[in-house]
Image: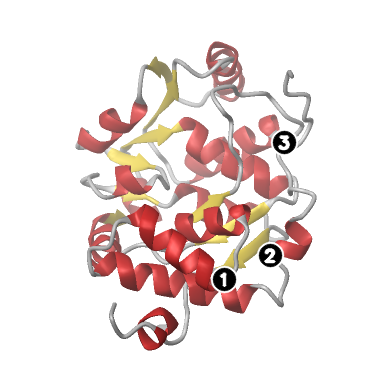
Amino acid sequence: MPDRRQHRGAHPQDQGLFDTFSEPELRQATCDLSWLLTRGYASVSALKLVGDRYALNARQRTAVGRCACGEAEASRRAAHRVQTQDLANRELWIDGYNVLTSLEAALSGGVILQARDGCYRDMASMHGSYRKVAETIPAIQILGELMAEWNVATCRWLLDQPVSNSGRLKTMLREISEEHGWNWEIELVPDPDPVLSQTDQIVASADSQILNQAERWFNLARCAIETRIPAAWIVDLSRGEGLTVMQERPDL
C-alpha cells in the first residue's frame, strides 16, 4: 500500500512503550546491552538476550539497539566529535535522510531517543521510500537557519539515490536554499555511508557505522532539536545503573 502518512510522529503504542514507567527498565536494558557489546558479544544475539530478559517488544528492542554501544565505540565517537564553533567557514557534509527524519519526528511529536553516545535518534523507518510530510519544510528551514547562524561555508547534502522520491527532495532542498541564499550542494549517491565515512570534511550524522569511522562529525540533529524544538519528546536511554545481565548470569 502507498505511504499516506502526513506526519512522522509517534507510533500508536509509543505512549505506553516509552512512558515514564518504562524508561528506567529501557535504560537498564541499554546499559546491559552496552556492557555485552563492550565485551565482544554479537549485537544480534546480545540484543535478544537483553530483550528476553526484560520482556521487551520489537519496538522497544529497536530503541535499545539504537541507543547502546560499547565503550570503545563511545570513546572513539566522543574523541572525533566537533562543536558548533568548529563549523565556522567550514564545509559540512550532511547525511540527508538521517538528519532530516529526526527533525521531522521531533516536530511531529515522535519519540526521540537520547543514546549513550550523546546522539539523538528517531524511530522512523522509510523502507526504501521517502514521503514528504507536514514537518519537512519546517525541518529544512530550521537546519538552514542554524547553519547560516553558525557561518557554515558550504553544506553538502547526500541523499540515497535508491530511495524513492530522492529526486523530489533534492529539488525541494535546492529551491529552499536558493530562496534563502544558502550555499548548499545536494547530491544523489548510491550509498552515502562510505562517502561520509571516508571524507576528511566534517560530517553530520547519527549513523553508528559512519560515526565509528568519520574523522570529524557534528551532532547536528541533537543541536537543532535542543535549540529549536524544546518541546520534543526525548526518551533518555543514555544512562543506566548496574549490570543486571552480568549479575544474574555469572557465566557471562
Q: State the CA–CA distance, disc 2 to disc 3.
A: 22 Å
The picture places residue 199, in percent across and down from the top left corner, at 22, 33
The residue shown at (60%, 13%) is 168
Image quarter hosting the C terminus: bottom left
Where is 155 relative to 211, above or below? above
Say which quadrant the N terminus sits in: top right
Residue depth check, mark 2 versus mark 3: number of the one nearer the observer:
2
Q: Which residue corresponds to the image point at 35% horizontal and 46% vertical from the top-left?
A: 87
The residue under label 2 is 18
> Considering the numbered disc 2 on the image, is that residue within a helix, a strand or a loop?
loop
Is 243 left or right of 214, judged from the image as shown?
A: right
Q: Nearer the viewer, mark 3 or mark 1?
A: 1
54 or 196, nearer to the observer? 54
For numbered disc 3, what is the local secondary structure? loop
Q: Residue at x 46, y 48 (%)?
A: 220
Q: Rounded to the nearest whole Å, what is the CA distance between mark 3 and mark 1?
A: 28 Å
List the residue tagged with mark 3: 135
Mark 1: few/some/many CA within 10 Å (<14, 14-19, 20+):
many
Residue designated by label 1:
26
